[in-house]
Amino acid sequence: MSQWQRHIIDANRFGEISLETPNSFTTFTQVTLKMNEDGTFEGLAKQENSGYAAMAKRKRYTSEDDSLSVIEKLEKEYPGIKIKRQTFTNLEIPHQSLIDSLELTITGHTDRLGQVVAFSPLLAFKTYENPLKLDNREYPIEFSYPRRHMVISSIEIPEGYEIESIPESIRVAMEDQSMQLTFSVALNGNTIQTYSDFRINRLLFLPAEYKGVKDTYAYLLNKHSEKVVLKKIN
C-alpha cells in the first residue's frame, strides 16, 4: 500500500482509496484509542498533511514569531488532547507529505448521566465551526485550492458497557458533486469505527449556490457533533 492509499472503514464498503490530489489541501487523520472507565481516552493518532496542507503546517511549526512549541500548538488546536510523545516524518523535506505521529490522552469529551456515557466518536478531531455565518451572500465564494479532510477513528470501549445508539451514516453532495460528505459509524465487536470524508472539489461558487455550500458544511458540523451512547451493564 503506497503512502497515497488508505483503507476505508464503512458500514457498506471496505477497501483502499487514493488520497493523491495534485495541488490540493489534503489532511488525513487516523486515530486508534482505548476508552477508560473514567471516560478518558488514550492511544495513537497519525496525521498526514499533503499538498498545501503540508506547506501550511510546516510554516506553522517553523515560525520564528511564535513562542509556542509544536506540542503546545497541537494541544491548542485540538481541545482536550495531551501529547505524551510526538515524532515527525518529512518535516524538512519540501514537497513530501508531512506526518505527525502522536501518543496522546484525551479528556473532557464525555457526558455522563448515571450509567449512561455519550461522546462524539471523532472526539477532539471533529469539526467545531461552520465558516459560513451569513444567511445570504451577494458575492461568490472562492477557495484557493481543492480541499479534502478525512478522519478515521477506532475506539475500543471497556468491558461492561453496551452500545445503545450510534450516529446514522449519511452521504450528501451538491448536485454536481463539487462538495461531498461521507460519514459512517460501524461496530466491530467492542470497537467503534468512524469514517468521515469531506471534499471541496471546485474553487468558485456563485451567490446562488451559497445555501448549498452552507448546508453541506452544516451537515458536516451536525454529524461530527452527534454522539455514541453507551450504557454500563455491570
Image: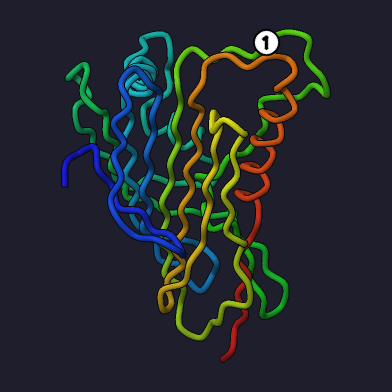
Residue extending farthest to the front is 176
- Could you tell me which quadrant the C terminus lies in? bottom right
Is residue 148 found left or right of 8 in the rendered image? right
Image vertical order of residue 6 relative to residue 94, above or below = below
Image vertical order of residue 99 relative to residue 85, above or below = above
x and y percentages locating residue 96 in the rendered image: 21, 24
Q: Nearer the viewer, residue 192 or 12?
A: 12
**Which residue, given by chain and number where applicable, does mark 1 sit on?**
140
Is residue 211 found left or right of 179 in the rendered image? right
Q: Nearer the viewer, residue 3 or 210?
A: 210
Please tell me in which quadrant of the rendered image residue 188 appears: bottom left
Marker count (numbered): 1
Which secondary structure, mark 1?
loop
Describe the colour scheme in one phrase. rainbow
Image vertical order of residue 34 relative to residue 152, above or below = below
x and y percentages locating residue 227 in the rendered image: 63, 60
Residue in the image at 52% along x and 57% along y: 184
Image vertical order of residue 173 relative to residue 153, above or below = above
Residue in the image at 72% along x and 22% along y: 210
Q: Nearer the viewer, residue 137 or 223?
A: 137
Residue in the image at 59% along x and 54% along y: 170
Which amino acid lies under the numbered mark 1 shown in the image of this protein? Pro
x and y percentages locating residue 218 in the rendered image: 69, 38
x and y percentages locating residue 140 in the rendered image: 67, 10
Badge 1: residue crowd in 10 Å (few <14, some 14–19, many ≥20): few
